[in-house]
Image: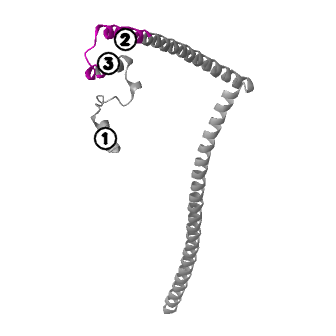
Amino acid sequence: MDTIEQPLQKQEQPTPPNPPPHPQAQPPRTQLSQHLSSSLSFSTPLSLDDDDVSRSALTAYRAKEEEIEKRRMDVKERIMSQLTRVEEESKRLALIREELETLSDPMGKEVTAVRKKIDAISKDLKFLGQICQKKEREYKEALDAFNEKNKEKAGLANRLTELTAESEKLRMKKLEELSKSMESLQ
């Protein structure tokens, strides 16, 4: 029977109105007002002494809250000053690093610029070399074709000369035969 009464007693006890999920997320004043409203709603009316105690507790709470806020602002100011100091130091370190780089290689920037130009020219040369090889191949092919046609022309010209010479010989022979036959007729 005791085990049954205990759950019933737990159910009869009033539960405070929905507590916030994270008490740290709400400002302290909101927490206090919720606490006071929940305690006021379930207790008997406050007497004058309870009211004074509540006020003094509220005053003490506000004083602590102000002190916490003051400390928070102090910490925030210190953090901001440290952040600005760190930023200044990192700027100085960057300047020192640049100076060290120029000390190690005073002509570094010029060397880098010349290397970049050399790389760009090398790329151009490679491209132009490919074009040159292509053109040389085309030229060689055209030259070979030209020489072949030239040989063919020379061969045909020789053949023409031979044919012409042969034709003249045949005509001369015919003329001589005609001339002989005319002489014989006379």
Is 42 contained in the magenta span? yes
The Cα–Cα distance between marks 2 and 1, rounded to whole angstroms, is 38 Å
Front position in the image: 87 or 60: 60
* Percent position of residue 102, x then y: 70, 24
In this view, the residue farthest toward the right is 104
Front position in the image: 185 or 64: 64
Q: Quarter of the image for the N terminus: give it.
A: top left
The Cα–Cα distance between marks 1 and 3, rounded to whole angstroms, is 30 Å
Tell me the SS state at disc 1. helix
Q: Is residue 51 left or right of residue 123?
A: left
Is 142 contained in the magenta span? no
Question: Is the Cβ of the residue at disc 1 closer than 8 Å to that at disc 3?
Answer: no
Q: Which mark is residue 178?
A: none
Neighbourhood count class around disc 1 (C-alpha, 10 Å): few under 14, some 14–19, many 20 upward = few
* Percent position of residue 72, x then y: 48, 15
Which residue bears the numbered disc 3? 36
Q: Amino acid at mark 3?
A: Leu
Residue at the image position 59 percent from the left and 52 percent from the top: 130
Tell me the SS state at disc 2. helix
Magenta residues span 38-63
Which residue bears the numbered disc 1? 5
Residue at the image position 39 percent from the left and 29 percent from the top: 22
Please state which of the two labelled residues, at mark 1 or mark 3, is closer to the viewer.
1
